[in-house]
Amino acid sequence: MTKKAPQRARTAASATTPVSKVVIFFMENHTTDNVASDVPGVCGNPTLPLAPDVVVPDPPHDHGHWMQRKTPAPGGARRQRYSAAELPNLYLLMNGFTVCDNYFSDYAGNSFPNHCFAIGGDAEWAFMNPGHRYTFTVQTPGLPARLSKAQKTWANYGKGFAFAQYKDPSMHRNVKTQAQLLADARAGRLPNVSWVYGPRGNDFHPGPVGQGDGSSMEASDAWLGSAVKAVATGKDWPHVMVFITFDDWGGWDDHVDPPAVEKFPQGTPFAGEPYRYGSRVPCIVVGPYAKASHVSHALSSHVSLIAFIERLWGLSPSPNADAKRRTMADTAMRDCHDFTQTPLAPPRLP
């Protein structure tokens, strides 16, 4: 009976929700202290000096450097922040809707494992980005496979790179461009779930512009504002929930130490060291049923996004036992919305 009760609760919730579209903006490489310290009520560090628009070089942010984050850069973390003047669109959304300040990246390191957690609730102990020195195939299909089985639609806007690393070929489908996102949002044609990745140079990733993954923070904030505005002014606004978060710590300091809830197992390169959680990253919840000007202190992570979607439509949990265990226990996003409130107006983005 204990195994069935959570499923019944999920089904009941899905019958009463006004939300039929979920959009996840998965941006790059910033901690809560780094981009949300000036939001009232957020547990940040507003004493940090301001950071430049373009950060050169890209701070190292693999697991080894994460373990050394308490030492000064370049070996450890950069200790700087961005203000509302530098990121006006992001701050407008954080101030007007809900921001989670106890939200952690799921992996204590760089991008790829965190992307997997936001797609399927688990990274199967991956520990770095796939490349010529490291290959990795995710064996269990992510949430998109279960969405399709439940007759729900989904898309990978911007060609998020982790989807291609899944063994199941169904995970490689539905790739669209960022331009298609803007068009679909304005026309009210968004799928039930959208994973959105910013264009190169506009995705908040540190590093020199025009070289590798580098971007301008000003340009990234402008692109994010235009993309959220397309959703907010489109026909899907009355039924949408938007989540904006950052994949990993990006080499930036955050003064809150994450709880070490899972450690690398024996037989892995970092056996016994923290695997989950990684550093705090902000998550902003935007939509007509997001709480207004609210700071959620509930413990949450990228897994919370998967848990929210599973409960929204009463989806079966992942066949991956670790992912199932995490999402079945995760109710953090309940603190971020109120489906009974008077719907909020769209944000007034430039």
Image (cartoon, rainbow, N blue to C red):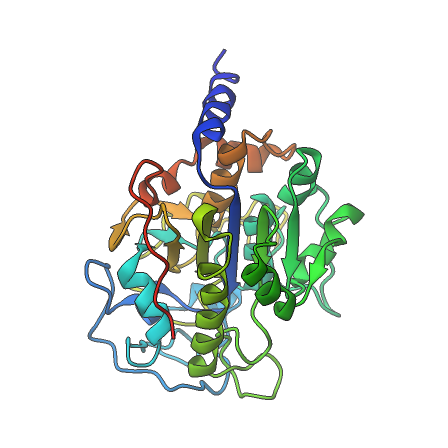
**Rendered view: 35 above or below 123:** below
Q: In the rendered view, tell whether residue 324 sits above or below residue 187.
A: above
Instruction: Locate the C terminus by quadrant.
Output: bottom left
- Quick check: 214 above or below 118? below
- Which residue is most to the top? 1
Residue at 52% x, 22% y: name it.
Answer: 7
Residue 87 at x, y percent in the picture: 35, 76
Quarter where residue 159 is shown = bottom right
Residue 247 in sight here: no
Residue at image coords 58%, 59%: 187
Spot occupied by residue 265 in the image (x, y as percentages of width and height): 57, 44
Q: Residue at x 72, y 54 (%)?
A: 174
Work out whether residue 268 or residue 216 is closer to the camera in this orientation and state it.
216
Residue sitting nearer the eye, 282 or 257: 282
Closer-to-camera residue (288/38) = 288
* Residue at horizontal 32 percent and vertical 77 percent from the top: 82
Relative depth, front residue between 108 and 150:
150
In the image, taking residue 178 as reference, residue 334 lies left or right, namely left
Q: How many marks?
A: 0
Q: Position of residue 95 (x, y in %)?
A: 27, 62
Q: Determine whether, in the image, residue 13 is placed left or right of residue 208.
A: left
For residue 9, which quarter of the picture? top left
When asked about the image quadrant of residue 38, the answer is bottom left
For this view, does 177 lie left or right of residue 326? Answer: right
Residue 25 in view: yes
